[in-house]
Image (cartoon, rainbow, N blue to C red):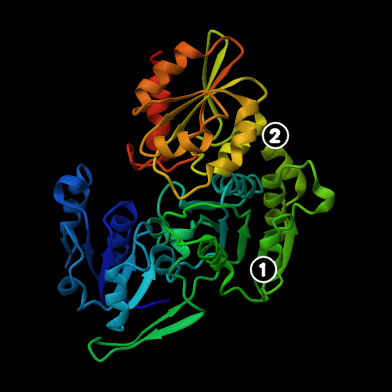
Amino acid sequence: MLNIKNKRVTIIGAKKSGIALARLVSGLGGKPKISEGRSIIELGSELEELQGLQALEYFHFELGGNSREFIEDSDIVVLSPGVRFDADVVRFAMEKGICVLGEIEFAAQFCNKPIIAVTGSNGKTTVVTLITKVIEAAGMKACLCGNVGSPFSEHVLHLDDIDYVVLEVSSFQMESLIPASSSFRDENVISDISVKGFKPFISVILNFSQNHLDRHKDLYEYFNAKTRVCLNQDRHDHAVINFQDHMLAKFALKLDANLIYFNKEDDKGKNPNHLAVKAVAKILGIDMEVCNGVFGKFGGVEHRMEKVRDIDGVDYINDSKATTVESGRWALNILNRPVVMICGGKDKGSDYTVLKDLVSKKVKKMIVIGAARDLINNAFSGSVDIELIEKLEDAVLRSREIAKSGDCVLLSPMCASFDQFDNFEHRGKVFKELVNKL
């Protein structure tokens, strides 16, 4: 285990992962400090939580930028998931010979339980939720964390009664993953820092499609970030890969881990998410009937095709978690009634035009909100009747006027939420509140 006692650990980013990291560092005897690029005004309610950390020994923070002076005496720099790996502050730290790790990788240094890490462009939250329920139905205990719920670093010192850590990981969290073991030394650093690479017992890559191209320069960089989840696995580990995704299937041939494919040729018509969960269960020695029992009782995850209510024969569906074009495609494909679709938000570099044919068949009216309004309007112009409305509140009111009995109103944004909301959960919660007021 990495010894950080008395080490100066600078955390970049003060959102919930950064707060959890500061507490973890302090609990391990380190000297935490947080560098946050946002100002006091931009932090809003998060400032109170940040100030609450001042009770920790040695803790201090800076706001309004990431200054070199604040970082240069660090032994370790840890990045919150929202911090780009090519940011100036990261380059500066690396040039100084400082050990730079992402939050997931740093927390993994102190984890003594097997990790099941799940990534992919779509379906991650559903799959990690199902894996957790299957493990618990089999009489074991699992800790679900990462990109869903609470940060890994919040739980890593509290795993004594846990059998498996089930981790949802995003491409952002894997950008900084390093090879199996790395050492960092610089004459300005007090001592060597040796870290182990992130090495899950089971990695799962569900699928790959365009996403986060506002963060990654192209599809190849995004693909490389996603597949780094397998980087340090060996013959003692397992990689669960979608056989129908040709890029992933080709990539999998290079892996050192035991390779398990799901969604094979003879699986056509079956739910790929269920197949992935069953592949993991088989590795863990869990009977398939346990999986089937969990699937039968599973009502879905919040903000993913979640029925809010029926009003005069119109179903209102909260699919706020649909932040990609492929998620929007999936939502439209499973609906068999006319759709009033509310979409839009902060663009992620997506190509919306790939859905023109499907939208023209399924959507009777598209209401586009948020910063990406003009972009989405241009993509679907001529394919569907479109209205541009800035705010979600007004879009919900307008959908009530448009939708008739037998229709459904679908919030499936196909965009990030950060133009108007804290995250997709916040957006979904607001949508449900608005619908319940109709």
Q: Which of 418 and 3 is in front in this view?
A: 418
Q: Is residue 171 in sight in this rendering? A: yes
Quadrant position of the C terminus in the picture = top left
Q: Which of 284 and 426 is in front in this view?
A: 426
* Residue at position x 27%, y 76% in the image: 92
Q: In this view, does 361 lie to the left or right of 109?
A: right
Q: Relative to 354, is 433 on the left or the right?
A: left
Q: How crowded is mark 2: few (under 14 residues within 10 Å), some or many (20 or more)?
A: few
Res 159 seen here: no
Where 262 sits versus 239, above or below? above
Would residue 431 be found to the left or right of residue 223 on screen? left
- Circle 1 residues within 10 Å: few <14, some 14–19, many ≥20: few
The residue closer to the viewer here, 311 or 365, is 365
The picture places residue 259, in percent across and down from the top left corner, at 72, 67
Residue at 33% over, 40% down: 419
Quarter of the image where one finds residue 236: bottom right
Image quadrant where one finds the N terminus:
bottom left
**Kind of element beneath mark 2:** helix
Q: Percent position (x, y) of residue 51?
A: 16, 52
Q: Please, is residue 238 above or below residue 127 in the view?
A: below
Label disc, if present, on residue 296 of the rendered structure: 2
Tell me which corner region of the image, top left, top right, bottom left or bottom right, holds residue 296: top right
Does the residue at mark 1 contact the one at mark 2 (Cβ under 8 Å)? no
149 over 165 or under it: above or below: above
The residue identified by callout 1 is 251
Which kind of residue does numbered mark 2 sit on?
Answer: Gly
Mark 1 or mark 2: which is in front? 1
The residue at 23%/46% (across/down) is 46
Q: Which of marks 1 and 2 is nearer the N terminus?
A: 1
